[in-house]
Image (cartoon, grey):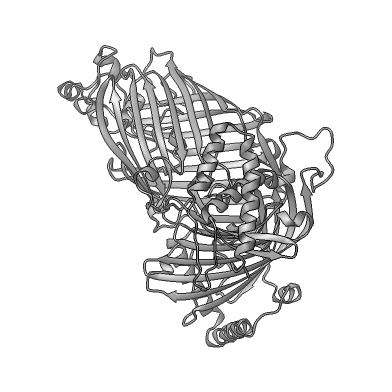
Amino acid sequence: MYSRKYPLLHSFSYICVVKKQFRFWCKRDSLSLVCFVLLLLFTPLSLRADGGEEPLLVGEDLLGNLLMEQIVAKAPRYADTISGFRSSFYMRGRFKVNRQNRLFRYLPSMFRLRKGVNDYLTETLGELHYSSPDVYNLKVRNLTGTFRRNRSELGHSLEYFNVNVYSPTLLPGRLVSPLDRKGAKYYEYRVDAMNMRGDTLQYRIAISPRNQSTQLVSGYMVVNAGSWTIDEISLSGEMEQLAFNMTIGMGREGVEAFLAKRFNLHLRYKFLGNEIEGTYRTLLHYDSVMTGRDEPLSAVKTEAKDPYDMTDAYLLQCDTGRISADTVLMARLRPYPLTAAEQQLYAEYAQSRRQVEQAYTVSQRHSVEFWYDVGDFLVSDYTIHLANSGSVRFSPLINPVMFSYSHSNGFSYSQEFRYNHTFRNGQWMRIAPKIGYNFTHKEFYWRLYTDYYYLPERLGHLTLKVGNGNRIYTNRVLEEMKLPGDSLLDFNKLHLDYFYDEYLHVANRIELFNGFELTAGIAFHRRSAVKPSELSSPELAAQAGRVQGLQRVYNSFSPRLQVSWTPALYYYMNGRRKVKLRSRYPTFSLDYERSIKGVLGGNTEYERLEVDVQQRIPLSLMSSLFYRVGAGAFTNQEDVYFVDYENFTRSNLPVGWNDDIGGVFQLLDRRWYNSSPRYLRGHVTYEAPFLLIPLLSRKVRIVDSERLYFGLLFTDHLAPYLEVGYGIGTHIFDLGVFVNNLNGKFGEFGCKFTFELFN
């Protein structure tokens, strides 16, 4: 369609653009004008006069950059032109299995193949709702195809609907857009073709990344001269094990010129010797479009409407558990007919189903399905929908994501289950048991977490939490040591009397007004000695240098009050359920707990008070800054108690890349968390896709994001403790390296490693 057979027209267009740019630069300082003239003089000319197919081109690279100046300048305004829309869509997908081996069916989230069949078809009808800037809600209404079950065959295809071509990022927060002013420095542009479409001159601009990164894309865009709008854009890149090529055709008339009308998507999945290709063609029909000047698409707003209520932007909620598989409906609404090859795929699928029904009894078919489910349960996130009783979700048993390693905590593994049930009146309940094992400390952990939301519109819910925590020692240990405040303890030389910790927490939490939540409850702890025989023998305790006068079991009954406030909190309502979104301000929290003797066998007394402030600030180009500041203290210290903080604690189970966004100390020995009746800490973490790796090598593709960590801690015997680190995030693993400083002296160097494959 696009050719370069008109060298004079191309040169004339080039001169026109240069003339416009010259006028622009004349309005600037003289130095800029001189630089512009020098740029013109030393721009290489690409001349072809051999009569071949390659035409005569003049100053391609300069022309591409000059055109991009116009496009990038218009993009922010075009990105905000459409503030919302509702559309219906039809998607047809074709899958081909090019290579497979015995590992294929053990790949998480992978669809199951029919024996001897390597070609599959799927069709989808659904709705798409968009609200500015990057809120996409997609709902699948009808799904048919030739797969054994309609569950995983959509793969990652639906993610590619989340594209506003003028937005600073594509697939929100995943890819840097070549149309963004700040992101343009990571790309190179070249005009490689031009065409007259009616009275409009169109340029085809090739896009190539300067660095090899999964955050960048390559491809081309077709731009309308004058308006500098996108007519078509094609982008290629990689995400995890997927290589994709996405071509988006924009509308032609009115406001639809700023909206995608068709998607052509090609996906190639390659992993462990398996290779699958998926080709999708999608058409969109817009039922209603809202520009920046229009009213919201939903009901008319009232004057009393909460300005932080974003329900209008979140009206569609995906409910994949109620997807229809009506083939008659699909045949009636299909916008264009099936090809002969596609009709043949449906016919072969129907014939294979009839053969299965004839060859197996009902019980045999159920048995086959059962063993398929067992295989899915081992390697995939799996959800069982119980009729009228909710759903149960499992994380896969065979999953490297459940393993993690850190320098101070060693190797850990965990497994989590979730049961959810929604009642007819909008109330809902969640039960989430979790188990785990720490191989380094040889300790088994378990936890049962239950929430019952009785007033979901006010986040009102009852919480029950039962489980066991880290092994802990009493405050008497450090008091008996009588060390100066600036002395550094060596826990390996201390004989600590450890206690098991079993706990029961019951609490009621409710939102008094938007962003302000109040929690009241009780906490019961039963701490029993790991080696009670040594505690019962004063002679053995004295020989071992242990603290005497300790009981075998300590119980604590503690009323607890917590206040949390996030000013200007945006949210949306999903039926009666309130869902928190974001805020431009930090979250403040205050946590107070007091143990009372004589209640439910309580034989220890203390007070605990903690304050915490934290916020994540989104920055440009998928970068963000996170900070967290907190302090805590135990008061009423005359009795035996256990220094066990709520905010300043160490998780005993695997924690991945988002470990409170760096709000933990990776190298701090877990025994330090219980060593002081007071603490003050601060954390700062900066995350961005391009920090150090592009400076070291332009060919590194695997790194998705990088982080810089900084943590500072003050306790009685750590004044201060400093920890800095650097981490990289990839789709396979996350790795962080850290170094610390204790009381002005170098401490140690360590790392943290977690798997992210299939996470």
Residue 123: percent from left, percent from top: 64, 71
Q: How many marks?
A: 0
Pick the front one: 524 or 603: 524
Viewer can see residue 161: no
Judge whether 620 appears above or below 335 on screen. above
- Give 201 or 347, whichever is nearer the viewer: 201
Name the side, left or right, on which 512 lies relative to 650. Answer: right
Q: Can residue 550 be seen in this view?
A: yes
Is 673 situated above or below 180? above
Question: In the rendered view, would you say 604 is above or below 237?
Answer: above
Q: Quadrant of the N terminus?
A: bottom right
For the residue pair 45 and 219, the one nearer the viewer reads as 45
Q: Judge left or right: residue 523 versus residue 8.
A: left
Q: Answer with left or right where residue 451 lies relative to residue 550.
A: right
Please identify the quarter of the rendering in which residue 446 is found: top left
Instruction: Determine the residue positioned at 80% across, 43% down.
Output: 293
Give residue 493's quadrant in the image: top left
Q: Which of 637 and 557 is in front in this view?
A: 637
Q: Where is residue 35 in the image (x, y as percent from the top left)?
A: 52, 39
The residue that appears at 38% across and 74% down in the rendered structure is: 101
Q: Which residue is drawn at 72% across and 51% down?
A: 424
